[in-house]
Image (cartoon, rainbow, N blue to C red):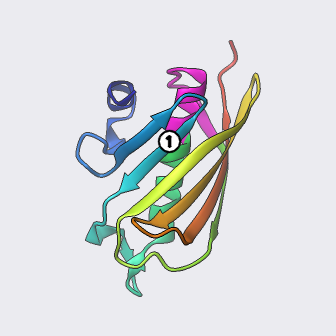
Amino acid sequence: MLAFVDEHFPQAGFGTGQFVLEALEAGGFCRVRMPFRPEWLRPGPTVSGPAIMYLGDIAAWISVLKAVGPEPAAVTSTLNCTFLRAAGQNDLVCETRVLKRGKKLVATSGEVCRAGDAELVAHVTTTYALPSR
């Protein structure tokens, strides 16, 4: 899976350690870690909302690819992120699942937590559009 991601979306940063794929299971479950980097910070200091949404979107995309197969043209149609508490200066982990796979759309749900902490930092839902066959 990561070879496909690195070929079609190298700027995602799996090859550089920006993100780490920790788990990937049939049916579209994945766990992606975003190691802490100072450039993710906003004043507070805490990991910024856009960085958290990026983590959620990358994890959702990996889940979708696992569920539908390697499809570089699958694109984010909607992304909703509910921020629940400050992330602080920590590694973050997003666990994402495919909720429903249709012919044209795939819906996912993801939970973002600080690494080693079960309390949610954010909840991310996405819908991915699949290309017409």
Question: Residue 50, percent across and down?
Answer: 49, 64
Q: Quadrant of residue 64?
A: top right
Residue at 58% from the left image edge and 67% from the top image edge: 122
Residue at 59% from the left image edge and 27% from the top image edge: 67
Asked if residue 61 lies left or right of residue 18, the reply is right
Question: Residue 131, percent across and down?
Answer: 65, 22
Which amino acid type is shown beneath numbered disc 1? Cys
Q: Quadrant of residue 103?
A: top right
The answer to whether residue 45 is above or below residue 110 is below
- Most extreme residue toward the left, as rendered? 16
Question: Residue 90, percent across and down?
Answer: 35, 72
Residue at 56% from the left image edge and 79% from the top image edge: 85
Give the magenta range: 61-76
Counting labels gives 1
In the image shown, does 40 or 121 lie closer to the viewer? 121
Question: Residue 14, percent across and down?
Answer: 31, 42
Asked if residue 102 lies left or right of residue 88, the reply is right
The answer to whether residue 29 is above or below residue 55 is above
Is residue 69 part of the magenta span, yes or no?
yes
Local crowd size for mark 1, using a 10 Å CA cut-off: few (<14), some (14–19), many (≥20): many
Asked if residue 61 lies left or right of residue 3, the reply is right
Residue at 66% from the left image edge and 26% from the top image edge: 130
Asked if residue 62 lies left or right of residue 80, the reply is left
In the image shown, does 79 or 33 lie closer to the viewer? 33
* Element on which disc 1 rests: strand
The answer to whether residue 91 is above or below residue 58 is below
For the N terminus, the quadrant is: top left
Q: Give the residue number, with chain letter if any, for mark 1.
A: 30
For the C terminus, the quadrant is: top right
